[in-house]
Image: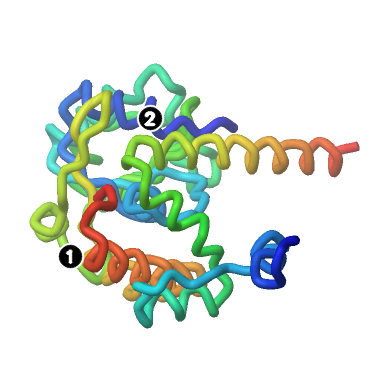
Amino acid sequence: MIDEETLAQINGKYVMPPEAGPAWRAAAEYGFDMSLIEETLRMTPEQRIEQHQRALNLVLEVMAAGERHAAK
Amino acid sequence: MPQNDKALLSRLREQNVEFVIIGGFCGVMHGASIVTLDLDICCHFNQDNLRRIEAAVKDLNPHHRLTANKLPLELTDELCGRLKNLYLTTDLGTLDCLSEVAGIGSYEQVLHRSVIKSMSYGEFRILDLDALIAAKLAAGREKDLDAVKLLRAIKERKEHQKDLFE
């Protein structure tokens, strides 16, 4: 049976790493998804750029769809 | 309009443009999970370097994106001497070229506070993390101050966990 803590994590609770310092905690409390930052920091700068390009393409696609919709 | 930062960077490098990557894209390279719609660079605004920038984008339909009539990029010796910034739109996306960065200073000062990142398509200089934080603080907009929170967290994490990619 899944315990309550694991269930909370499955449901999106971020577990602060034990080494997290005050700036990391402040960013998490501000609302940044620090689990994503942890993943990104394990990437090379080139991988980060590729990830950014994919996200950017999606944003631009959504913006273009919005403009098309507004033009109708 | 598409935004292909890799292609823009490759073109600048092919033309030997002297520049340092700044702004949100620099934050992305440091590990920030933000999406930025343009590529910002700080560069030498001497005539040679400006001509190299022009050569890098000349077949990309470059225009001054902030001018009312979207004037095409057509540099002259006289214009080169008067430019401080170039805000361009191209077929590969937006490219903003600045001669100085608030909170840091001139290109020489920006260069002094830059680090080299190696990519499969070349080596590029980007603002170091402390300088990027200073620049974002100086810019002072809400989104910049949000980014500072994230960049400070990344800086702290990198200082404590040395096996992360710089």
Is any part of residue B58 visible from this angle? yes
Q: Are marks 1 and 2 in contact (CB under 8 Å)?
A: no
Amino acid type at mark 1: Gly
Is residue B113 depicted above or below A5 in this figure? above
Q: Is residue B42 left or right of residue A43?
A: left
User: Which residue is found at the position 53% from the left and 70% from the top?
Assistant: A15
Where is mark 2, residue-wise? B6
Residue type indicated by callout 2: Lys
Determine the residue positioned at 85% across, 44% down.
A70
Write the residue at 24% across / 52% down. B163
Pick the front one: B101 or A30:
A30
> Which quarter shows the C terminus of chain A?
top right
Residue annotated with mark 1: B105
Decide which of B26, B100 is in the foreground and name it: B26
Q: Quadrant of the N terminus of chain A?
A: bottom right
**Disc 1/disc 2 C-alpha distance (Å):** 26 Å
Which residue occupies 44% across, 34% down?
A: A50
Name, please, the residue furthest toward the right. A72
Image mark 1: chain? B
